[in-house]
Image: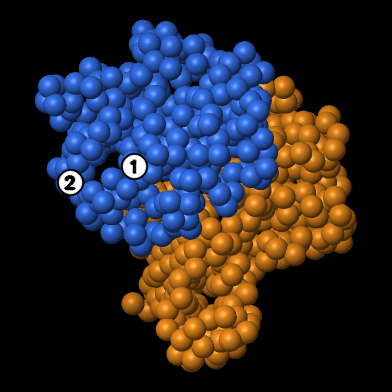
């Protein structure tokens, strides 16, 4: 059995704890959080060891990996400590608050050959995987333009302060919702090298943005749009989509369906001229245990599989997470420039 | 339980195959009257149970049921709690503590309030009971013979192996509401084993059951084995596998398992409701 522990028991941490706890190859031996209320619930109802100090936990418990799901500002010190102790690390997204720190963590993990993964779960949703496959198979021909979007109802009224209202702690929509979209664009279409026309707009939050808009240009010169808003109550839950436009047509992809329009058929893919719609039922990744979506279990399966087979993560490595942080920095710098100029 | 349980996903923009269809539904069911109209059509076809989330708008539907007691005298609601997105969005924004503060009734910092007392004493079961009471408030005066925990919560407790929470929930629903506790899950075989392990026998379990194994975690084989061999009261949901199956073959498949007591389905057109109801009654 692979032995693991969770650090940070917020929404994502508890969800990970349930998935890790149910994993047939893993023994979840400990959890760590600063809330005594949450720890007491674990003490009372489960058999795992509870800690309020992650260093003490790593010292005292024999572990193969830690999963870190704390607020972003703690990632650097925790990930670094775990790597130095020789543990494989799964870290929630966004990866780091400064790319300097992120680069150091990447180097450390890779030099010690420790499995490292970041929680961009959309790559484990079958439809987005299919989109990547179709783009790689060039069904659209030359790519001309893309649009990456995410909308949802997280902050829908004026609210007081939590860590999410502090930009320096990664609390806004840019680090939260937008990072998912940036990571999808980067891994499916190509890595952005330039941000322009970036707008970080506050709607209800004080101090942080609730919406992010702008243009991204990829290394090959193709540009596209980013449009993200977490204060949009016309959506019941977070809704992420990627549209890619090429010379031979267009693909619109979200977590439930993939709609393909082709000017000319692509026979090797069995795709006709005109519209084809495919649904998640054809692409869902089978899992042993389901909580909130196959993707959450599938990403943990991937991480555990890498540890078991002594392979480095190919999906959502620290390096990929770090690149998303770099694009976030480009957007912040560009938005500042807009403010000064405008 | 009735063989036919009418669901509410179509009313609240839940569509597992298409976000776009979900939005179209949310436009169609903007007014409560549109929901009540479809519900009345279902009732006129002989459907007597609505299985629904504790969504804010269900409170309005409940007001309508209470205002027309003769019309809805024999009508049952199976509440499914909590409405998970409400809490998930709150936890993202406010954290776990903030969410408890927001949803536990009364001032949790006052030792004189029941919530404050439970909170200070870390009386988790007391907090659970307060949250259940808050969710159940909208159903006062309405028949609720079965009360479900939603799959997100069921499966979270299951994964965390906090099985005693099921035991406490089970006891509270029976004692306080004189109702049968039910469980919605995406992990039916594992859940049944867990419930049995804390002495909960023959539970009502609502899970995905369909011919293509969609959302049947661990695989279709073990689901079929449990449906044939184990003792529990299954309700089948997602029988159309988010639209991948046609109703006739989908419901025909359920006929292979005589243990299945009910089918949960949602539809918004009269024809679809009629068709599904007839197929269920013919096959179950």
Whole-Å distance between the Cαs marked 2 and 1?
23 Å
Residue shown at the point (17%, 46%) measured from the top left: B34
User: How crowded is the residue under tag 1: few (<14 C-alpha within 10 Å), some, or many (20+)?
Assistant: few
* Image colour assigned to chain B: blue
* Image colour assigned to chain A: orange
Question: SS for tag 2?
Answer: helix
Residue B278 tag number: 1
Relative horizontal placement of residue A234, taking residue B225 as reference (left or right): left
Q: Position of residue B235 (x, y in %)?
A: 47, 33
Residue A62 tag number: none
Mark 2 or 1, closer to the camera: 1
Asked if residue B145 can be seen in this view, the reply is: yes
Mark 1 — on which chain does it sit? Answer: B
Relative horizontal placement of residue A211, taking residue A303 as reference (left or right): left
Q: Position of residue A67 (x, y in %)?
A: 70, 44
The single residue placed furthest to the front in the displayed view is: B282
Image quadrant containing the C terminus of chain A: bottom left
Asked if residue A177 can be seen in this view, the reply is: no
């Amino acid at each position: 059995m692979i032995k693991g522990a969770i650090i940070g028991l917020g929404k994502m941490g508890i969800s990970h704890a349930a998935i890790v706890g149910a994993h047939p190859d893993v023994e979840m031996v400990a959890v760590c959080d600063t809330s005594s209320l949450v720890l007491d619930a674990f003490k009372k109802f489960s058999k795992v060891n509870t800690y309020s100090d992650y260093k003490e936990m790593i010292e005292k418990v024999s572990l193969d990996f830690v999963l870190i799901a704390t607020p972003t500002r703690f990632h650097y010190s925790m990930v670094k400590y775990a790597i130095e102790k020789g543990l494989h690390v799964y870290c929630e997204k966004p990866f780091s608050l400064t790319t300097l720190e992120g680069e150091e963590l990447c180097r450390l993990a890779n030099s010690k050959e420790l499995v490292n993964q970041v929680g961009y779960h959309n790559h484990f949703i079958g439809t987005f995987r299919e989109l990547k496959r179709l783009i790689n198979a060039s069904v659209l021909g030359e790519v001309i333009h893309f649009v990456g979007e995410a909308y949802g109802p997280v902050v829908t009224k004026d609210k007081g302060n939590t860590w999410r209202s502090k930009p320096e702690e990664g609390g806004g929509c840019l680090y939260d919702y937008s990072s998912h979209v940036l990571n999808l664009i980067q891994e499916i279409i190509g890595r952005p090298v330039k941000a322009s026309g970036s707008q970080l707009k506050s709607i209800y939050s004080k101090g942080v943005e609730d919406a992010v808009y702008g243009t991204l240009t990829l290394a090959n010169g193709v540009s596209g749009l980013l449009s993200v808003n977490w204060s949009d109550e016309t959506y019941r839950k977070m809704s992420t989509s990627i549209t890619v436009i090429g010379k031979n047509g267009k693909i619109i992809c979200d977590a439930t369906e993939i709609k393909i329009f082709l000017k000319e058929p692509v026979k090797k893919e069995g795709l006709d001229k005109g519209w084809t719609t495919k649904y998640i039922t054809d692409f869902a990744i089978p899992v042993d245990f389901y909580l909130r979506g196959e993707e959450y279990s599938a990403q943990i399966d991937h991480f555990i599989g890498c540890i078991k087979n002594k392979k480095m993560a190919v999906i959502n490595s620290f390096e990929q997470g770090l690149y998303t942080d770099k694009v976030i920095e480009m957007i912040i710098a560009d938005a500042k420039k807009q403010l000064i100029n405008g | 339980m009735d063989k036919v349980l009418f669901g509410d996903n179509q009313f609240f923009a839940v569509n597992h195959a298409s976000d776009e269809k979900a939005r179209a539904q949310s436009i169609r069911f903007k007014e409560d009257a549109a929901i009540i109209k479809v519900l009345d059509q279902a009732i006129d076809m002989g459907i007597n149970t609505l299985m629904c989330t504790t969504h804010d708008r269900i409170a309005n539907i409940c007001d309508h049921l209470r205002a027309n007691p003769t019309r809805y005298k024999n009508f049952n609601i199976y509440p499914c709690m909590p409405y998970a997105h409400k809490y998930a969005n709150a936890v993202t924004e406010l954290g776990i503590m903030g969410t408890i503060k927001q949803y536990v009734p009364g001032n949790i910092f006052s030792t004189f309030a029941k919530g404050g007392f439970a909170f200070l004493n870390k009386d988790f079961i007391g907090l659970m009971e307060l949250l259940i009471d808050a969710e159940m408030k909208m159903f006062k005066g309405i028949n609720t013979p079965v009360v479900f925990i939603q799959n997100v919560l069921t499966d979270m407790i299951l994964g965390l192996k906090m099985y005693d929470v099921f035991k406490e929930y089970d006891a509270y629903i029976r004692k306080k509401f004189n109702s049968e506790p039910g469980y919605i899950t995406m992990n039916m075989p594992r859940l049944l084993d867990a419930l049995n392990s804390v002495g909960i026998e023959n539970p009502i379990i609502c899970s995905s059951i369909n011919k293509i194994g969609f959302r049947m975690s661990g695989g279709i084989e073990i689901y079929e084995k449990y449906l044939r061999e184990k003792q529990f009261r299954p309700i089948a949901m997602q029988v159309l596998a988010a639209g991948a199956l046609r109703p006739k073959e989908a419901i025909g498949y359920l006929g292979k398992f005589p243990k299945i007591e009910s089918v949960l389905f949602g539809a918004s057109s009269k024809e679809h409701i009629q068709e599904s109801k007839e197929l269920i009654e013919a096959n179950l």
